[in-house]
Amino acid sequence: MLVQILGADRCIEVGVYTGYSSLAVALALPESGRLVACERDERSLEVAKRYYQLAGVAHKVDVKHTLAVDSLRSLLECGEASRL
């Protein structure tokens, strides 16, 4: 609901687990939207990615399989600070 109310087109989720909330965010994003999903557990990510595919939103989700702090640092270093 917040994604829609704010009109967000870029989001970050730290800790995906099986993807329930990140799937809800991806579904609410516009077609050109992007979700950066950070998760360190590979098994959880595999479950989440399967649901992204089934829901047809995998193209909106940029999965980062690493510690969130490393993903966030990388985004900042790439100039994403003012974009996310």
Image: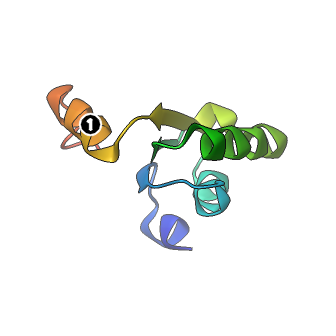
Which residue: 50% across, 64% down?
3
How packed mark 1 is, by other alpha carbons closer than 10 Å (few <14, some 14-19, many 20 or more), is few
Q: Is 19 or 27 nearer to us in this picture? A: 19
Note whether 1 is above or below 12 in the view shown. Answer: below
- Quarter containing the N terminus: bottom right
Residue 47 sits in which quadrant?
top right
Farthest top residue? 78
Q: Is 5 or 75 nearer to us in this picture? A: 75
Q: Which residue is mark 1?
A: 70
Relative image position of residue 19 (x, y in whole percent): 64, 54
Which residue: 46% across, 49% down?
9
> Label 1's element?
helix
Q: Is residue 52 left or right of residue 9?
A: right
Relative image position of residue 54 (x, y in whole percent): 83, 42
Identity, as a three-letter code, of the amino acid under mark 1: Asp
Q: Is 1 or 52 nearer to us in this picture? A: 52
Which residue: 64% across, 31% down?
59
Relative image position of residue 64 (x, y in whole percent): 45, 34
Note whether 29 is above or below 65 in the view shown. Answer: below
Q: Is residue 74 left or right of residue 8?
A: left
Q: Is residue 15 left or right of residue 45?
A: left
Which residue: 77% across, 46% down?
51
Q: How many discs appear?
A: 1
Q: Is residue 43 left or right of residue 65?
A: right
Residue 78 sits in which quadrant?
top left
Note whether 10 is above or below 22 in the view shown. Answer: above
